[in-house]
Amino acid sequence: MSTALEHQDLLQILAPDGTVDASRDPGLDDETLLRMYRMMLTTRVMDERMMNLQRQGRIFFYLASTGQEACSIGTGAAFEAADWVVPGYRQPGLFLWRGVAIKSIVAQCYGNAWDNTKGRQMPVHYSFKDQNMVSISSPIGTQLIQAAGVGMAMRRRGDKQAVLTYIGDGGTSSNDFHAGLNFAGVDKAPVVFIVENNGYAISCPTSKQTASETFAQKAVAYGMPGVRVDGNDVLAVYVATQEARERAVRGDGPTLIELVTFRMAGHSSSDDPTRYIGAEKFEEYKQLDPLLRLRRLLESKGLWDEEKDEALRQEVRDEVNGAVKENERVPKPELETLFSDVYAEMPADLRACLEAEQEARGEGKFP
Ligand SMILES: Cc1ncc(C[n+]2csc(CCOP(=O)(O)OP(=O)(O)O)c2C)c(N)n1
C-alpha cells in the first residue's frame, strides 16, 4: 500500500458517515479522539461567541474557522510541543490544542492589559511564544518565508524538530508562496506546508485563483511531495501531517499538504458570504461538517451519545462565556506599554512625549 504522502487521489480515512478505512486507521486511543472532538467543539463555540462580540461592538474584528476545525486539530495533533508553528489567521483550534487558554485568545481580541501583544495588533493576530507559535502576520504569504527560515535554522543547528505553517488557497498566488517553498525545497528544510483550500479567497473562487488542477501538484515544482487530503476528515489530516513531520525530522525535507475543506461562514466579520456562495453549498456542507463526522465515529465506538454531547456543549459554552466575562473586567494596557519593548533605554523625545501625557493626566512620572 502507498504511504499517505504517496497517495494519488484525495486521501480520506474517516468517511462522512463515520466509518473508518481500516487500512489507514492511525489507531488513536479513545482519550485522544475525545480530546480532538472537545477541541473542535470549543473552537466552534468560541468562534460563534467571538463573532457575536464583534456584532455587539465589543471587539472590532474577528476571523472564524467554522467548518475548518479538523484542519487545525488534525495538524496540531500530529506535531510535538517542542516543534515550531508559524500560523495563518484561520487556525484558532491549533492554539487551543497547544494549550493556550481561551482567556488569552479573548484578551488578544480585546487588546486589553492581559493581551500579550499589548493592544498593538489587530484582533486575531496572536503571538504565543510559550507554545512556540510565531506572531501572525497580516500580509498573506509572509509566514511561509518565515517558516522556511526557521526550518533552515533548525537544520543548521541539527535540531530534531519540525515547523508547521499554513496558508489559504488565495495565498498560493503570493510571491512568498514561491519563495518559501523554493528555499525550503532547496535547503531540505524540515517544514510542513499546509494549504487550507476552503474554495474561496474572500469572494474569489479557486477557479480564478489557479489554472493548476490541484494545489498539491504545485509541490512538484519545488521538489517535494504534495498530497491532497480531505480537510474535513480529522484522521486523514492527522495521518498525512504526521507522515510529513516524520519525513521532515528525518532530514528528508519539506512537504506540501492541500486540505480540501469549506468555510461554513464569512471570510471575516466584515464579509457577507451569501453575496457570492449559494445557499445549496452551505446545505451540502452541513452533511460534511467535520464535527459531525468525528461525532459519528465516537458514537460508533460507544464513546458518545446525545446526552454527553449536550453536556459537553454546555460545559464548553460556560468555559467560553467565563473567559469573556473575565476579560470584560480587564482594563486597557497601561500607557507606558506604548513605549516598551522597542528601546533598551527610552530616547529623550519619547520620554518627553510620555511625561507630557502623564502630566496631562495628572499622573506621576514613569520611573
Ligand atoms: C499581501 C496581502 N494582500 C491582500 C491581503 C488582504 N486579504 C486578507 S485575507 C485575503 C484572502 C485570503 O484568502 P485565502 O488565502 O484563500 O485564505 P482564507 O481567508 O480563505 O483562509 C486577502 C486578499 C493581505 N492581507 N495581504
Image (tube, grey):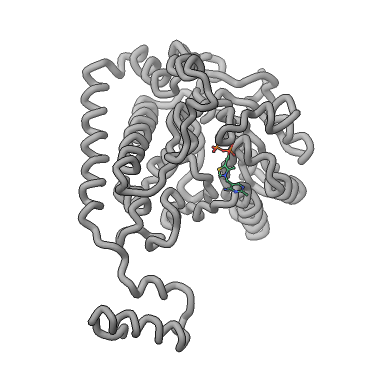
Work out whether residue 35 can be spotted: no
Closest to the observer: 352 or 261? 352
Closest to the observer: 271 or 207? 271
Work out whether residue 90 can be spotted: yes
Q: Position of residue 204 (x, y in %)?
A: 61, 32
Closest to the observer: 172 or 52? 52
Image quadrant, ligand 1 = top right
Q: Position of residue 221 (x, y in %)?
A: 79, 38
The residue at 50%/23% (across/down) is 233
Q: Quadrant of the C terminus?
A: bottom left
Quadrant of residue 365 within the rendered picture: bottom left
In the image, is residue 218 above or below residue 164? above
Closest to the observer: 361 or 20? 361
The residue at 46%/26% (across/down) is 264
Quadrant of residue 9 within the rendered picture: top right
How many dots with numbers? 0
Q: Position of residue 250 (x, y in %)?
A: 65, 43
Q: Position of residue 138 (x, y in %)?
A: 54, 52
Q: Is residue 166 left or right of residue 216?
A: left
Of all residues, the one furthest to the bottom in this rendering is 348
Q: Is residue 139 left or right of residue 8?
A: left
Q: Quadrant of the N terminus?
A: top right
Q: Is residue 35 left or right of residue 362?
A: right
In the image, is residue 48 above or below residue 176? above
